Image (spheres, grey):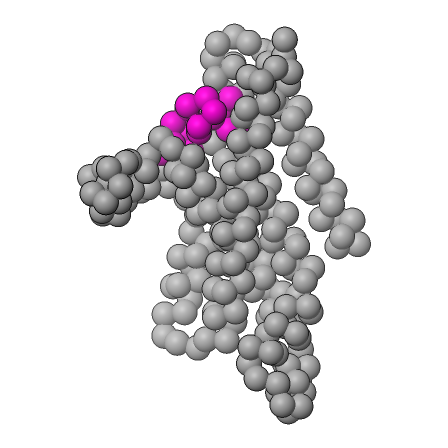
Amino acid sequence: MIFSAHFWDPVILSIKTAGTAIIIVSILGIICARFMHKATFKGKLLVETFFLLPTVLPPTVIGFLLIIIFGNQGIIGEFIYFFTNQSVMFTWGAVVIVAVIIAFPFMYQSVKTGLDNIDPEIEMAARNAGANELQVFLYISLPLCIKSIISGIILSFSRALGEFGATFMFAGNLPGVSQTIPIAIFTALEAGNTELAWAWVIAIITLSFSMLLFIRRFSG
C-alpha cells in the first residue's frame, strides 16, 4: 500500500527538517541582515558574497565541504566526536545542517532587501522621538519589512524541502533518520517502484505549490 508508514516517514522528516531549519535561518538571517544593513566596513562585499555562495555552489561541493568540516576527522567534527562520542554525519542533525546552509541565503537576501527599502527618515523620526536602536529595529524596521520576512521564510522552507545532493552526501539515505522526500524519490526510482516515486513527487509538488501560492497571495 502506497500510503503506509513507509510513505509518510520521508514526508514527516522533510517537513520537520525544513521547519527546524526555518527557525534557525530566520534568527540568523534577520540578525545578519540587520548587521549588514547598518555596517560599513572594508570587505563588506566579500562577506555578503560569502553569505550568498550556497546559491551558486553545486550541492556536491557543499556536501564535500561539510564532510571535511563535520566529518570524524574534520575541524569541527573531531571536536564534537571527542566530547559526545558520536559522529555528526548520517544523523538527522546532519540533515538540518545542510538545510540551514542551503536555505540561509534566501532568508538573508530577502530580509536585507526589505531593510534596504525602508525610508531612513522613518527610522530617524523614531530616534528623534526618543527610541533607542533596539526599539527602532523591533517596532519600526521589522514591521515595515514583514512581507520580505515572510517571503524569505517561504522561499527558505521550499529550498530546504527540496534539497537532495548535499544531504545525500553528508547525511546519507537512512530511512526514518535522513531519508527526505527527494532522496526517497531517487531510491524508489532506483528500485523500479515508479508508483511510490510518483506519490512522493506529488507530495513535494503539493507542499511546494502551497508555499508559493501562499507567498503570492500574501504579496498581493
What percent of the width, then of the height, locates residue 140? 66, 75
Closest to the observer, 137 or 166 = 137
Residue in the picture at 53% in, 31% down: 13
The number of callouts visible is 0
- Taking the magenta stretch, the answer to whether it contains residue 107 is no
In this rendering, is residue 71 above or below 199? Answer: below
Residue in the picture at 65% in, 59% down: 148
- Taking the magenta stretch, the answer to whether it contains residue 183 is yes
Residue in the picture at 76% in, 52% down: 218
What residue range appears in magenta?
A: 166-184
What percent of the width, then of the height, locates residue 71? 26, 38
Give the position of the C terminus as an image quadrant: bottom right
What percent of the width, then of the height, locates residue 216? 75, 48
Q: Can residue 39 be seen in the rendering of this structure?
A: yes
* Quadrant housing residue 87: top left
Q: Can residue 74 be seen in the rendering of this structure?
A: no
